[in-house]
Image (cartoon, rainbow, N blue to C red):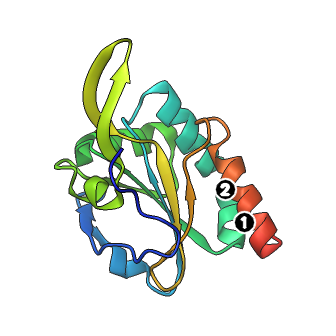
Amino acid sequence: MMNTLKIGDLVPQFSLPDQDGEQVSSSDFIGQRLLIYFYPKSMTPGCTLQACGLRDNMDKFQKAKVEILGISTDKPEKLYRFVEQELLNFNLLSDTNHEVCKKFGVWGEKSLMGKTYMGVYRMSFLIDENGRVEQVFNNFQPSNHHNIILDYLCITDKI
């Protein structure tokens, strides 16, 4: 695994196209808390489960004043279909050249059924109002991802 961002690290500046082709920048969220979650591939069972868990708990994230961005290496057209199909209520960003994935340290060698390939690690970063990593989430299943983060927010924010 690459050098993953840690708690207290300053988030690298980035700007990526969302599902509508609009540029979204990390600087757009200064002064707000932001959950950036990296996922391998839109419209796959695990990633759909993960995205829908966030979608279905958006009211709780809003209560905790946390914005959500999903980042994968999918093209904006595929992200658009994913958002439409699953009625997602947050933006997905397209990192086709893996630049942002590399900056966060979530791009690296993976293996599946004996085959080795390069891909995105399923990890999430809670960013504080000052653009620093508040918490890193990397020990979860797609089905309980939202609960792990909400549990952390409940403990820290008493939502």
Which mark is drawn over residue 149? 2
> Is residue 111 or residue 44 the one in the foreground?
111
Tell me which amino acid carries mark 1.
Answer: Leu
The x and y percentages for residue 93 are 33, 55
Q: What element carries label 1?
A: helix
Up-down relation of residue 44 to residue 6 (above or below): above
Residue pushed farthest top?
113
- Whether residues under marks 2 and 1 lie with C-beta atoms below 8 angstroms apart, the answer is yes
Up-down relation of residue 142 to residue 107 (above or below): above
Residue pushed farthest right?
158
- Badge 2 crowding class, 10 Å Cα cut-off, few under 14, some 14 to 19, many 20 or more, is many
Label 1, on which residue? 153
- Residue 20 is at least partly visible in this image: no
Which mark is drawn over residue 142? none
Measuring 50% from the left and 39% from the top, which residue is drawn there?
Answer: 86
- Badge 1 crowding class, 10 Å Cα cut-off, few under 14, some 14 to 19, many 20 or more, is some
The x and y percentages for residue 126 are 54, 66
> Is residue 75 or residue 99 the one in the foreground?
99
Up-down relation of residue 32 to residue 119 (above or below): below
The x and y percentages for residue 109 are 29, 34
Q: Which quarter of the rendered picture does the C terminus lie within?
A: bottom right
Tell me: 130 left or right of 62: left
